[in-house]
Amino acid sequence: MSGFYASHLTLIQQTAVVAVLAMSFQVVLRSGVFSFASAGFYVVGAYALANMSKAGWPLLPALIVIVIIGAAGGYLLSIPFVRLRGLYLAMVTFAWAEILVVVADNGGSLTGGPVGMFGVTLGVSTPELFVIVAVAALLISQVERRGLGRALRVISIDEQLARTMGIEINRQRAFIFALSSALGALAGALNTVRTSSVAPTGFGYGLIVLGLTMAVFGGVGSWTGAIIGAVVVTWFPEVFGFVGNYRSVVYGILLILVVVFEPSGVLGLIGKLTALIRQVRAAT
Amino acid sequence: MSTLLEVHDVRVHFGGVKAVDGVSMHLAEGGLFGLVGPNGSGKSTLLAALSRMTDLTSGSLRFAGHSYERETAQWVSRRGLGRTFQTVRLLPSLSVLENVMVGADARLYGPGIVSNWVMPWRTRQREKAGRRAAMSAVERLELVDLMDSAAGALSYGTQRRVEIARILAAAPKLVLFDEPTAGMSYEERDAIGKVMRQLQAEGITQVLVEHDMQMISDVCDHVFVMNFGVVIAEGDAETVVQDSAVQEAYLGRRGDGDATAGSH
Amino acid sequence: MEQLINAIVLGAIYCLFAMGLGLTWGTLNVLNLAHGAVFMFSAFTCYLITQRADVHLPIAVVLIVAVVAGALMELGLDLLVFRQIKRRSRTQGEAEMSMLIGSIGASAILVTVAEQLTADTPFTVTAVPVKASVYHLGSGVYVTNVEIVIAVVAPVLTVGFALWIQRSRMGRAMRALACDAPTSGLMGISEGRMSALAMAISGATAGVAGVFLTVYLDSVTADSGSDLLLRAFAVVVLGGVGSMWGTLIGAFVLAGGETLVTATTSGIWTSAVSFGLIIAVLLVRPSGLFGKVKGVRA
């Protein structure tokens, strides 16, 4: 077992980092908020950490500050964005994610331009990564339970009903938007720490495809779906090595298949299976 | 008996269409009021205005002493004004109990979010209270056996009952029923009528919008008849039915005996 | 002055491209994020034919190839993805989100294939550059025939389609569909045929835009699609969803703004103009210049 662990350390760490990205997508999609803004805040977090590392910050304070920046930034963005209906919000947050790539490319010494920044001295151990992911998952799980969880579900299904049930729609949406942005920033920062570098490749649109694939495939109903998606998407190129650079083609196909046949993802399938088993048991 | 809901000269105009054009009513606490009128008379728009789903063009509303024509639907729902809709609006993938708990949430949870999120001990109490309220509503509407079933899988009549349970779980002061028995069988309709009378006995004020005149006269103390956005008659059921203006409004409708349950 | 010509040409391309996006959005409630990828892949198809397969075609034929490729791609997207989703979704909201995600998936496929096959380097639609005749307009201003063609054809197509949507029977049918699909169905409007038509037109315009832009800029890359999509968003936000005239004006305003920014910042912040416009419009007048309020706010 430890042999497996040692030889796959990079992948394991990668899974942990993208899991946070997946959660940032899952948490908004579950509530019917079509925000891709976390992909933009990923960029913010990634470069913020690189710069903080250069300035000598220790890891935990840096991460905490980055999460706060992500949340505050998300909240600010939500002011003009929160009332936007689904598709419109998707479009606008897509633009936000793309714009930050442009900023990254032209950021001069702050971002290292198209080349990026190397030699980030801050590091993180794998157990530390797992703890961070677990804490994030815990926080998200709280958003899925009890009254808050129900309220967010109502908003995603029937907004008018939500109003007559005393649910403050805009506030809830702003909250979930800020939460998602904070998670995106955290994911970006963790990735910089993991790879000890940051560069504009793979940001923006590519990041959105990755995040969506994980969240949608795993199932946006719960944070567990995000974890499932992260594991599958990260390990799949391992198992199907021949795919190589055409990974994104597979992601695209996966996205289409899931969204057509089982929009609730793996979690949805599992749910249906357990219901079926229950029915069979009850009948016999 | 005090007035729970004061409606004063409410008008709701959509561009050129005067859906509600000067309606005033005083609803005493504990009353069971009927609101009838032909299609297009403005009943649904009035309900929308009362529940603040639509903005008023002019006029004022007072609920339990508070002016609320400028408040949001959320505001008035948290203060105890509940409503049902013409079409069933449940969350099909959630269980019956969970759907009813959404109603309880309306009363138990304030607008604050972050506090609910980071203080799980607070929400634990609320969850327990909500579950209790939901359970008692579920029992009342005889839904206990179906408590854990997915709401989407149930029959239409049963879904209607879940909706009513949801309203009850919020312990409302006033409930607006928008054609709640459309599509129900006679037995189901009678059962709903019984529930309404029970609620009245507990002091809950109710407004029933219905096409079924039989149910109206069985259940309501006081009836308002609307047409063309105004109230054309009011009084107890028998008086109102014999009013000439009312008969004219319903010209062509069949007699009381075989009143049909709505044309929707 | 040269800048003005540049702005006009770019604006023309933007409005043609944005119109396709606005068409499917306004009539089918689909935000087709693959529109950018289709634009790029239409040009890429021409590249494959004229350079990989070594079939030399005059530019006019290349244009036709792109139109057909674009139309087929978006039609395929409709038949294989959007329609399947609509058939199986329970609610409108779920369908919208699923179609959006599906379109992202489709674009990932197209972009990755093009990226790998071109090794992520720029490509052109014709093997030899298009012969450009230059016309002198006086006081040192030159304009090429390419620029003239684009600046004339693109807006004409856009306005033509806009008028068609507004005046023709089929156009009215499409708009009826957008308002109320079930009732339209009852009135004999076939949702299937209308959506196929809308997507085909949208794809065709993407194809035209693909050839135009590639010729104008000399080449494009596999990720040019998402850049253009960003512009289209700004155009749609500025002009207002559902307004063809808004799209026209918005496109030229954007192109003008970009040209200005390029001139003053040497091109670094050009892409940011789109986003800046979007934010500004959303803060000041969310429905855009001519937009209908429906479809924007919750």
Image (cartoon, rainbow, N blue to C red):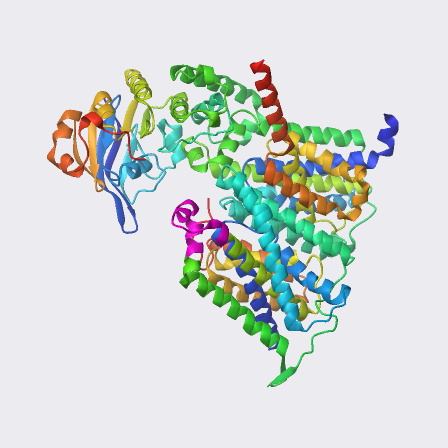
The x, y position of residue A135, in whole percent, is: 68, 29
Q: Is residue B190 magenta?
A: no
Quadrant in which residue B201 is drawn: top left
Q: Main secondary structure of the magenta part?
A: helix
Whether residue B86 is visible: yes
Whether residue A58 is visible: no
Q: Nearer the viewer, residue A172 or C99?
A: C99
| A142 on left or right of A247 | left
Q: Nearer the viewer, residue C252 or B209?
A: B209
Q: Nearer the viewer, residue B137 or C222?
A: C222
Quick check: B96 above or below A95?
Answer: above
Q: What's the residue at 59%, 75% (across, down)?
A: C149
The x, y position of residue B21, in whole percent, is: 23, 43
Quick check: C252 above or below C86?
Answer: below
Quadrant in which residue A41 is drawn: top right
Q: What is the magenta range?
A: C173-194
Quadrant in which residue C134 is drawn: bottom right
Quadrant of the image for the N terminus of chain C? bottom right
Q: Is residue C174 magenta?
A: yes
The x, y position of residue A113, in whole percent, is: 75, 56
Count of numbered marks? 0
Q: Residue furthest top?
A: A284
The x, y position of residue B155, in whole percent, is: 42, 25
| C236 on left or right of C180 | right
Q: What's the residue at 36%, 28% (across, down)?
A: B82
